[in-house]
Amino acid sequence: MTATFDELGILRLPQVMQLVGLRRTTIYDMMEKGIFPRSISLGARAIGWRVGDIRRWLEARRKTQ
């Protein structure tokens, strides 16, 4: 499967919070429990999430509701 550029994009925490409707603490708690996509390191003090990972997580949530 070839990933598109949109799938490879990176979202920062404020964008992720807005998209998924969750606060920072909830996102980190869910990551710790393995039920939210893990962030990736972008540098010494920066992290982000892959667009594709967040998109798949949202789609899975919609299917279970």
Image (tube, grey):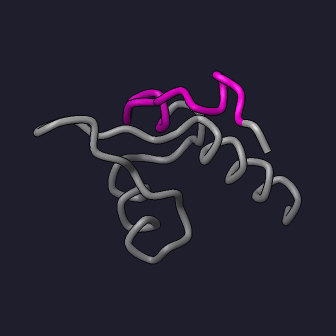
Query: Outermost residue toward the top?
Result: 5
Q: Position of residue 40 (x, y in %)?
A: 36, 47
Q: Can you say whether 26 is above or below 55 in the image?
A: below
Residue 60 placement, left or right of 46: right
Q: Position of residue 49 (x, y in %)?
A: 45, 41
Query: Outermost residue toward the left?
Result: 44
Q: Can you say whether 16 is above or below 31 in the image?
A: above
Q: What residue sits 65% from the left and 32% below the top? A: 7
Residue 59 placement, left or right of 23: right
Query: Outermost residue toward the bottom?
Result: 33
Q: Is residue 6 magenta?
A: yes
Q: What residue sits 56% from the left and 41% below the top? A: 21
Q: What residue sits 59% from the left and 42% below the top? A: 20
Q: Can you say whether 44 is above or below 5 in the image?
A: below
> Could you tell me what secondary structure mostly forms the magenta stretch?
helix
Residue 5 placement, left or right of 39: right
- Quarter of the N terminus within the rendering: top right
Residue 9 placement, left or right of 45: right
- Quarter of the C terminus within the rendering: bottom right
Q: What residue sits 47% from the left and 30% below the top? A: 10
Pick the residue in front: 35 or 50. 50
In this picture, which residue range is highlighted in magenta?
3-17
Q: Quadrant of residue 45?
A: top left
Q: Is residue 8 magenta?
A: yes
Q: Position of residue 16 (x, y in %)?
A: 49, 36
Q: Quadrant of residue 13?
A: top left
Query: Outermost residue toward the front?
Result: 2
Pick the residue in front: 42 or 61. 42
Badge count: 0
